[in-house]
């Protein structure tokens, strides 16, 4: 079904049972031979799906897992080679994703590696897997998951790139393909404040080293130490996390794209005061002077004042009360309410006979903490929203929708 929906698929052997993540690729009740049998079964079963890209052999080898000490019981590199050969024999199209280990006595520093995050021994013990099929997939986290000693250094976060280079980044320069298997955290929504600093530093590192492929942990909000891309309502994305990822995935944010998106004569952060950072996807200036349609003056002498009373006003930021009446009708539907806050869907319908570029203002309760499918400005209880590049025009007798969540004060 994922393939049918257009998703690309990497399957991950995450747990060997319904308990904790095992240190090795086998357990007392799950053998190495069964592990390889299961991997090849999956590789063969889905071999005709065009978007089935690869298999992650084993999630987060750690603890006693070793690399290069010539022990068949613990050497992860040898087990990975054996599993890769078996998979490629039944499905030669797949990519083989290999995690690192944790600490190692062989050819490795001892400065706080993550489970699955240490590839240092690779420089002494290369993997016998075809390089055009091999993907190194380190797991890398910040202080929300574990407050490593180097997060408390005086030079944090400037000390991090050297550590990441040592743990895995050095191999990109040697021609290896690197796809970060897991990274993420609460990003300031609970947890430690410096985790947000860590994530921003990590994304900058990935961009600078052209390592922009990766998996963010997690989509779901109930991952205890990281939270999710979704908020606790399981519906609403954290917009700041999305902004971070859109920046990583080379969709330039409005506040760093070199464009005057809000037509105020100012471009990007820090020049445009509507921008709070280079990652901000909303350039709308929070400090504009009061517009004609919200200045409490009857500028066109028609006996009515400001939006929404004056039909010449299309919104509270409209600076011309002489506009033709808008054909847009706005309705707000609250779809979840938990007392301290709520989420709603807004329908903007064009009841006219011509297409319109839409911009609407509505009154809300509290302070917006996320809004999707539109850009917006909030002034007091009023938010003014307008379409993005892909949905800014509403056709006659049609509607567009956006949504938001607000925290009541």
Image: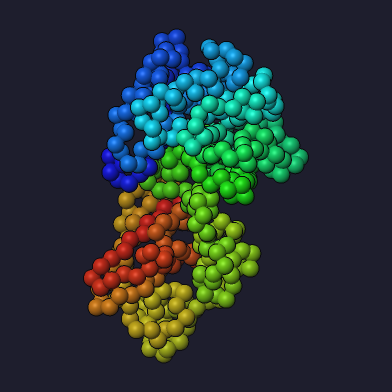
Q: At x 45% / y 13%, what residue is drawn?
A: 27
Residue that lies at the very extreme toward the bottom in this rendered image: 301
How far from the left and from the top, in percent, is residue 289? Answer: 56, 76
Q: Please state if 345 lies on the left or on the right of 225 as rendered.
A: left
How far from the left and from the top, in percent, is residue 147? Answer: 64, 32
**Observer able to see residue 169:** no
How far from the left and from the top, in percent, is residue 261? Answer: 51, 69
| Residue 341 position (above or below residue 312) | above
| Residue 115 position (above or below residue 307) | above
Q: At x 35% / y 27%, what residue is drawn?
A: 90
| Residue 123 position (above or below residue 272) | above
Q: At x 47% / y 20%, what residue is drawn?
A: 82
Q: Nearer the viewer, residue 263 or 367?
A: 263
> How is the structure coloured here?
rainbow
| Residue 265 position (above or below residue 379) | below
Q: So how many labels did they put on this image?
A: 0
Q: Nearer the viewer, residue 264 or 157?
A: 157
Q: Please state if 370 lies on the left or on the right of 356 as rendered.
A: right
For residue 35, which quarter of the picture? top left
How far from the left and from the top, in percent, is residue 132? Answer: 49, 37
**Observer able to see residue 404:** yes
For residue 138, which quarter of the picture? top right
Q: Nearer the viewer, residue 385 or 316?
A: 385
Q: Please state if 224 lies on the left or on the right of 51 as rendered.
A: right
Work out which quarter of the rendered image holds the N terminus and state it.
Answer: top left
Q: At x 33% / y 78%, what residue is drawn?
A: 326
Q: Please state if 173 lies on the left or on the right of 137 as rendered.
A: right
Residue that lies at the very extreme toward the right in this rendered image: 154
């Amino acid at each position: 079904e994922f393939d049918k929906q257009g998703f690309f698929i990497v399957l991950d052997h995450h747990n060997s049972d319904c308990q904790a993540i095992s240190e090795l690729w086998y357990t007392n009740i799950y053998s190495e031979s069964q592990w390889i049998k299961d991997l090849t079964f999956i590789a063969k079963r889905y071999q005709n799906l065009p978007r089935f890209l690869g298999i992650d052999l084993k999630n987060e080898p750690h603890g006693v897992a070793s690399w290069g000490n010539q022990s068949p019981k613990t050497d992860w590199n040898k087990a990975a080679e054996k599993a890769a050969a078996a998979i490629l024999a039944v499905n030669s199209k797949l990519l083989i994703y290999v995690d690192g280990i944790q600490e190692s006595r062989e050819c490795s520093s001892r400065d706080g590696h993550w489970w699955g995050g240490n590839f240092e021994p690779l420089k002494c013990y290369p993997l016998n897997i075809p390089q055009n099929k091999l993907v190194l997939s380190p797991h890398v986290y910040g202080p929300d998951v574990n407050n490593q000693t180097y997060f408390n250094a005086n030079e944090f976060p400037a000390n991090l790139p050297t550590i990441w280079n040592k743990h895995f980044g050095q191999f990109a320069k040697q021609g290896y393909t690197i796809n970060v298997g897991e990274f993420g955290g609460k990003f300031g929504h609970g947890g430690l404040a410096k985790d947000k600093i860590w994530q921003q530093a990590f994304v900058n590192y990935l961009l600078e080293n052209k390592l922009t492929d990766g998996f963010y942990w997690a989509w779901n909000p109930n991952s205890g130490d990281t939270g999710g891309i979704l908020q606790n309502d399981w519906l609403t994305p954290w917009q700041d996390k999305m902004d971070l990822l859109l920046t990583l995935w080379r969709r330039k944010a409005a506040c760093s794209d070199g464009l005057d998106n809000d037509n105020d004569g100012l471009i990007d952060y820090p020049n445009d005061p509507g921008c709070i950072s280079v990652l901000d996807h909303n350039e709308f200036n929070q400090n504009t002077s009061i517009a004609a349609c919200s200045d409490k003056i009857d500028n066109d002498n028609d006996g009515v004042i400001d939006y929404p009373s004056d039909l010449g006003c299309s919104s509270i930021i409209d600076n011309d009360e002489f506009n033709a009446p808008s054909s847009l009708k706005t309705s707000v539907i609250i779809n979840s309410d938990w007392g301290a806050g709520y989420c709603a869907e807004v329908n903007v319908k064009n009841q006219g006979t011509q297409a319109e570029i839409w911009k609407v203002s509505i009154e809300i309760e509290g302070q917006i903490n996320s809004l999707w499918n539109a850009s917006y400005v909030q002034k007091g209880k009023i938010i003014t929203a307008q379409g993005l590049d892909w949905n800014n025009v509403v056709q006659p007798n049609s509607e567009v929708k956006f949504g938001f969540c607000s925290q009541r004060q």
